[in-house]
Image: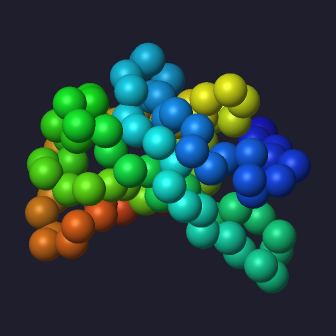
Amino acid sequence: MGVNVNSVSQTYNKDVFTDRGMYCGKVEDVECDLKRFKLRSLVVKSAKGSYVSSVLAGRRGLIVPFSMVEAVGDVVLIKHITAPLPEDGSDIATLPEIKH
């Protein structure tokens, strides 16, 4: 089941939590697929001292594919991130796409 968002502006500056309640940061930007009128991913700026900042190993943020988004409301819920991400030299980590 997909998550419906009426407006892209609904996602900006929202707090992002994993489905286990761990704070990740705030939505900084979104990537849209204009051909299909769908959100492709969320760019989350990691908060200092947050759970996800320890998983990111010093990176500034995280690109979350929209398939990992569980809900958008007062906050954004994403699927839990468990393992440290591999080092690729970039400033922002990209999570892999989840196929249903």
- Image coordinates of residue 52 in percent, x first then y, are 28, 37
Specify the color scheme: rainbow
Q: Residue at x 68, y 26 (%)?
A: 74
- Image coordinates of residue 53 in percent, x first then y, are 23, 40
Residue 58 or 40: which is nearer the viewer? 58
Q: Report the side of 57 relative to 13 (left or right).
A: left
Q: Report the side of 57 relative to 44 (left or right).
A: left
Residue 19 or 99: which is nearer the viewer? 19
- Image coordinates of residue 39 in percent, x first then y, are 70, 62
Q: Is residue 46 above or below residue 19?
A: below
Q: Report the side of 11 relative to 17 (left or right).
A: right
Q: Residue at x 47, y 29 (%)?
A: 17
The quadrant of the picture occupied by the N terminus is: top right
On the image, which quarter does residue 83 sit in? Answer: top left
Q: Report the side of 79 relative to 90 (left or right).
A: right
**Residue 73 in view of the camera:** yes
Q: In the orientation shown, which residue stands out farthest toward the bottom?
A: 35
Give the tally of numbered discs.
0
Q: Residue at x 20, y 56 (%)?
A: 59
**Residue 65 in view of the camera:** no
Q: In the orientation shown, which residue stands out farthest toward the top?
A: 21
- Image coordinates of residue 92 in percent, x first then y, are 30, 63
Q: Residue at x 68, y 70 (%)?
A: 32
Residue 26 or 17: which is nearer the viewer? 26
On the image, which quarter does residue 90 sit in? Answer: bottom left
